[in-house]
Image (cartoon, helix red, strand yellow):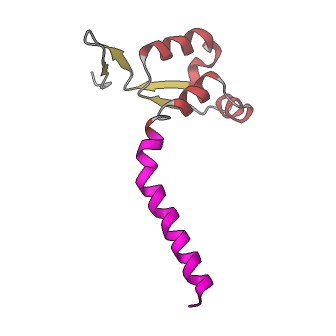
Amino acid sequence: MNIKDIVITVCLLAGIYVNLLFQDSLAAGHEGQWQLQRLNHPSAAQLAAERRGRVAIYDGLEVSEVEHALDHQFDRMGAMMFVRTRFPTADGGFASDNDCD
């Protein structure tokens, strides 16, 4: 190994380490954002897939977000499935529906 190979290896390992170190904290702030984006602003490809029968499963959204989607995306209701919907509790937190009857 020459110095160039050592530098490349060190940089690669440092990048992997930083990714592993910060991935949870970076993901925590954007946990459900992609679902809301997909739910409220679907792409043309997503709409085409829904017309072909694809159903999108949305997991862990707040009940207010689900109600908003059903009110404003009524024509897409057949392509949506909501699981583990979160409901507000009296103490300011959220309780999740386990979807079992």
Q: Where residue 37 appears, x then y in whole percent?
A: 60, 28
Q: In the rendering, at what x and y percent does residue 75 appear?
A: 65, 15
**Vertical side of 80 occupied by 74: above or below:** above
Tell me which segment is drawn in magenta.
1-27
**12 or 47, which lies in front?**
12
Rendered position, 74 above or below 56: above
Left or right of 93 in this view: 64: right
Residue 25 is inside the magenta segment: yes
Residue 5 lies in what quarter of the image? bottom right
* In the foreground, 19 or 65: 19
68 or 8: nearer the eye? 8
- Residue 61, percent from left and from top: 44, 24
Q: Is residue 29 above or below residue 64?
A: below
**Horizontal and vertical percent position of residue 26:** 47, 43
Per the image, is 82 magenta? no
Seen at 28% across and 25% down, the residue is: 100
Quadrant hosting residue 11: bottom right
- Residue 45 relative to residue 89: left or right: right
- Residue at the extreme right: 44
